[in-house]
Amino acid sequence: MDARILELLNDMEPITLEQMSSIRLMNRTDTKFVTNKTQLVRLLQHAQGKYYAQVNEGKRVATYRTIYWDTEGHRFYLEHHNGRAPRQKVRIRTYMDSGITFLEVKTKNNHARTKKKRIEIPAPDRWNEVGGNEFVDGLVHAEMQEMRPTVQNLFNRITLVNHAKTERLTIDFNVQFKNFETHQDCGTGELVIIELKRDGNQYSPVLDILRKLRVKPSGFSKYCIGSLMTNDALKRNMFREKLVTIHKLVNNTY
């Protein structure tokens, strides 16, 4: 399946990071979709001639590693579970192909808009050498010393850009989770997470494709789902239905 995905990506016209830097989505809206690799292959078939495929470090499929930090009481997880807004996530993300690492704070406000602020750090365990604690304290009102690494994910990402350059599409798959508290690991099998980032209500070719494939919008937090899949002790009432859907997609039983 992954070989077919790469084959279809190679049939798309490439776009570099430098060329993508001109795409400024000033009035951005984000929409997530959850599906599986079978549907991803169909999506890429329909997207031929409509999208560019990002190429970075000579690759069309990038590898990311993210370490989420949380308090002992799982403050950020519970904010999301309980539907609180604004809510935040603190994470350290490494772009594995280049080795570049960022300490990031993501904030989702009352209007469902997400803002991300970040600083580059030398390595995941060297966040305080460049003022990481002060950076987080200024945004979260909590110190890094109050938090600890909770869940790590490792995944592959495809990035597509429509020919009109009014949207970006990130497609994540082969997600692997590791829980630092329970020491449990798990994979997500056939699961695919798609996020559409577009300029306001501009026409989106992929929305038409997803409708044809009957893939509907669905919120998805890698931190929350990864936590649930590797820690049975966490509160999960609000995520039960989503976990059933994910189980079907992971096992390709849809």
Image (spheres, helix red, strand yellow):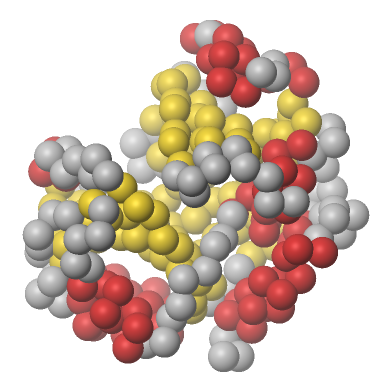
Q: Residue furthest right?
A: 233
The quadrant in which the N terminus is found is bottom left
Quadrant of res 22: top left
The residue closer to the viewer here, 253 or 167, is 167
The residue closer to the viewer here, 131 or 142, is 142
**Viewer can see residue 162:** yes
In the image, residue 160 lies at what x, y percent?
A: 24, 60
The residue closer to the viewer here, 118 or 66, is 118
In the image, residue 111 lies at what x, y percent?
A: 49, 46
**Viewer can see residue 91:** no
Residue appearing at x 49%, y 9% in the figure: 130
The quadrant in which the C terminus is found is bottom right
Q: Image check: 128 left or right of 23?
A: right
User: Number of labelled discs?
Assistant: 0
Asked if 101 appears above or below 234 in the picture, the reply is above
In the image, residue 33 lies at what x, y percent?
A: 46, 69
Quadrant of res 177: bottom right
The residue closer to the viewer here, 81 or 135, is 81
Residue appearing at x 21%, y 73% in the figure: 205
Residue appearing at x 76%, y 63% in the figure: 238
Asked if 67 appears above or below 2 in the picture, the reply is above
In the image, residue 15 lies at what x, y percent?
A: 13, 53
Q: Image check: 162 left or right of 239?
A: left
Residue appearing at x 24%, y 40% in the figure: 26
Q: Image check: 207 left or right of 121?
A: left
